[in-house]
Amino acid sequence: YEILELTGQFRNPTGGIGRSMPRVKTATKEQAILEAATRVFAMRPYHEVLIDDIASGAGIGKGTIYRYFETKDDLYFATSLYALDHLATALEKARAPQESATRRLEGIAREILGFFWDRRHLLTMLTRFERSDREAEVQKRRDSILRLVQEAILAGIERREFRGINPRIGAEVFLGMTRSANLFRRREDTLDELVARLVLVAPACFPHADAE
């Protein structure tokens, strides 16, 4: 394996070893790698994660991971998208259009906070790629989550639960608050307490409709 001196990552040379035929990649094995990577990256900062740990968690050899992801950074990015996709799916399943806007926001906050509760390092991962050449892929996933929050706020405006609120910026504020709550919560905080505080405080922080 070639060592990338600046990043400390490894890349599998394109030539392979000897004349052996390349093995076929499978979706099942790729998912196993991403599942293991999600667990490992969630537990510790990027620079402390070893590919060996991920390989062990997936029950495969380290070389197999490099057939799917050329570098540790590629795997890190793919894991970020995988986590966002799973969160978006969970939020879609939890949708309850018949409920009040406040209850819908409560459900969204609970899903997001619960998802990242023991995975706070994944939040750091997402921040890393939001300001990079890979931002578009992360933003696409984030927009699907933002849309659900915006729909809840719009429903609240229609039902007169909220008044004079800019739904787009309000949705951004709400997601920012859930992220901050998870990153900076205290050890003694509970999920129920944080959700209750968010739903109580968030509407008062939403910008008015004339805000740009």
Image (cartoon, rainbow, N blue to C red):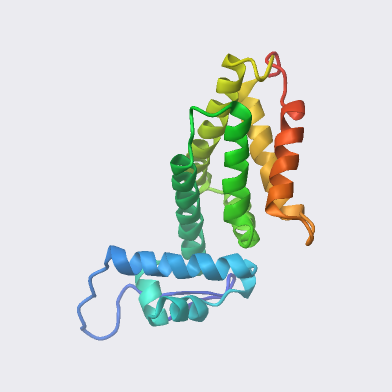
Residue 70 seen: no
| Horizontal relation, residue 111 to residue 10: left or right | right
Where is residue 157 shown, x and y percent of the image? 61, 17
User: Residue shown at 77%/27% (left/top)?
Assistant: 204
Quarter assignment of residue 62? bottom left
User: Residue shown at 61%/61% (left/top)?
Assistant: 119
| Horizontal relation, residue 197 to residue 140: left or right | right
Where is residue 186 shown, x and y percent of the image? 79, 57
Quarter assignment of residue 92? top left
User: Residue shown at 63%/71% (left/top)?
Assistant: 47
Q: Is residue 134 above or below residue 92?
A: below
Q: Is residue 155 above or below residue 2?
A: above
Of 174 and 10, which appears nearest the observer?
174
Where is residue 151 shown, x and y percent of the image? 53, 27
| Horizontal relation, residue 164 to residue 37: left or right | right
| Image quadrant occupied by the C terminus | top right
Residue 42 seen: yes
| Image quadrant occupied by the N terminus | bottom left
Q: Is residue 174 above or below residue 167?
A: below
Of 72 and 205, which appears nearest the observer?
205
| Horizontal relation, residue 141 to residue 167: left or right | left
Of 63 and 178, which appears nearest the observer?
178
Q: Is residue 21 above or below residue 204?
A: below
Q: Residue furthest bottom?
A: 18
User: Residue shown at 61%/23% (left/top)?
Assistant: 167
Q: Residue furthest front?
A: 99
Number of marks drawn: 0
Where is residue 65 shown, x and y percent of the image? 40, 73
